[in-house]
Image (cartoon, rainbow, N blue to C red):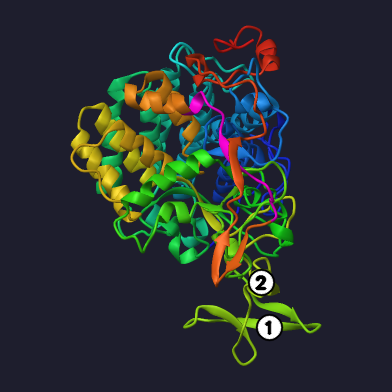
Amino acid sequence: MKKIITSALVVLAAFSLSSCKDFLQPKSEGAYSTDNYFTSDKQAIDAVDACYKEFLEENFLGRDIMWEQGAANDFVWGRTRPWPELGTLSLTTSCAVLDAVWTRVVRTIARSNWAVSSLLKKQETTELTPIEKRSLGEAYFCRALSHFYLAYRYGTKEQGVPFLKYEDVEGGYNNQIPTQNASVCDDYRMIVEDFSAAEELLPRCEEYADSDFGRAHKAACAGFKAKVYAYWACWDKEQWKNVITEVNKMETQYGRSIKGVDYTTCFSSDYAKWRNTEYVWAIPSEGGTKGTYGGMEFPGVILDNSLWGLWNAWGQFKPSLDIYEEMSKDNTNLVDATLGNIRLANSICEYGDQVKIWGQTDFRFYSNRDVEAGFMVIKYAEPFYHGEGYYYISKDGKDVQVNFDEQEQWWYYGDKVWLTDAEATNKKWKVTLDAVTAGYAGDNSDWPTCRMNFPILRFADCILLRAEAYLATNEAGKAATDINTIRERVNVKPVLGSATWADLYHERRCELVFEYSDHLHDCKRWAVSGDPQIKALALAELNTHPRVRHYENRSYPGEYKNRVYVPNTNFTVGPYDDYKTPEPVWQDYKIAFPYKAEDINKANGALKQNKGYN
């Protein structure tokens, strides 16, 4: 199954349509002007592919937008960054990483705007081909999605974000400064309009060929509309009913469901598992030694720095003790104890946990580099499990291969000579085939991608948005039904009777942990306008510093004692050692980020800073 092969669009520099690097090294088609573009289906495809391209760039969804999550209590930054004020939400003005994301978002809006207005102009005189109609729908989708990332992160009820539809400019777009909307509610209305226009034009996801898998489709439009309405409801409670309508439509019209979809399927390197009913929108990604790489670097940058010498992981995001404890609450509420805590086991590893890396079956996690957390994210680690090799010990000056006896549940060499505890602890792994050579992980140290259909929006997220809408509209029984759908799949006992806001908080936090669902902004919107119960839970995060485990010996994961592995528990619990001051203090103006001062000055009054910032 292939990903979208996006071609860089070389068009007017005034529209910021050139890119810093080609995606998957596409073939050049030469330079075009607005006068001779959109003369073929290929040009239409290239135009919208240039819009998609921005989403996976490092400065957008590729990584940088996730630094913000350090301000909640699920993620900590594994490596010190030069903007600690972002981690404590003590910003007085913008910072470099926010500016980088802003640039990518605005560029995506510009590219999408140009494609929309150009195709609409052509449509006035010539009927569009089926591919051009689809491309118009994709351009609407990309414009809506990028506009949404701008709106909810910078807009408030009292002040919207700058946005302009090129097709609304009489005589054509003339490089004028976009108007800042009076309220973010105006932005949300325009975003919904664009998603609806896209939904009308786009095919169902099942209609795409494998080579086009990953393009926008009808269910993705409905799913993102549900999310927009949920964020709009922060300022207008009437919008909750629209969340319910859109998610219902996803089920009844577009066949979205999580039933029959294993939780781990959503984070698999197996192409055959990517087209499942939970899929809403994702960025198909690749690895291997092909010399070209497509997709998200995020699954690589979150693994422990250098991956113990096996691969160029960056160690940049790590779980906190807070999220580990929140997810551990399910341990006492499992349906089948033998199945364990499925979400926790497939999301976080702690010292001494078995982690299958490069084919190893008995590698034990530890982390002795960068800022300490005591945990690692493994939600996206499945591609890195692949590989082959064997264990060995040094015996009498020789390397001796060892094997595992399933019946005895212990290690041996030769004619069943059992290893001592010390030998089992200190055995080494010889790699004969690594995940890079096997085609699962990339060998590009500057773009550490892997084979994964990286989820941006899953139907599980939409189900929980509907559950939230039911709670907000006093239908707690229906909310329980949705929440229990999520819990049933991951071996957690159902909520009995009516659901509570605490149930909703727990499920969104645990089900969607480390995903692009934006837990930080969930906390922000709940802190501003949520029910008192969920408001208190959100404030508990926003007003505290994340905690981690500090180990006395960071290089010691544990050891075998009497054939039982005993993990290292010699740690103390304390605050994460980076961005520790000032102590976070929530104020409602922090629901929005500050604009860059330089952009405000250049706008000459057309862009006003958000309240609370310089």
Q: x and y percent of residue 606 in the render?
A: 60, 10
Q: Residue at x 38, y 24 (%)?
A: 535
Q: x and y percent of residue 383 in the render?
A: 57, 62
Q: Range of the magenta residues?
A: 541-555
Name the side, left or right, on which 500 lies relative to 127.
left
Residue 467 in sight in this render: yes
Q: Residue at x 49, y 82 (%)?
A: 408
Name the side, left or right, on which 427 lies relative to 264.
right
Residue 38 in sight in this render: no
Q: Residue at x 63, y 20 (%)?
A: 582
Q: From the viewer's perspective, is residue 392 above or below residue 283?
A: below
Quadrant where the C terminus sits is top right
Q: Nearer the viewer, residue 491 or 266?
A: 491
Q: Which of the marked residues, 2 or 1, is nearer the chain's N terminus? A: 1
Identified by mark 2, the residue type is Ala
Q: From the viewer's perspective, is residue 48 above or below residue 522?
A: below
- Which residue ends up furthest to the front in the rendered image? 562
Q: x and y percent of residue 206 in the render?
A: 38, 57
Q: Where does label 1 land, which residue?
A: 401
Assign a secondary structure to mark 2. helix
Q: Which mark is residue 478?
A: none
Q: x and y percent of residue 158 in the render?
A: 45, 11
* Front tag of 2 and 1: 2
Instruction: For marks 2 and 1, give the CA distance.
Output: 16 Å
Q: Where does label 2 land, which residue?
A: 422
Identified by mark 1, the residue type is Gln
Q: Quadrant of residue 69?
A: top right
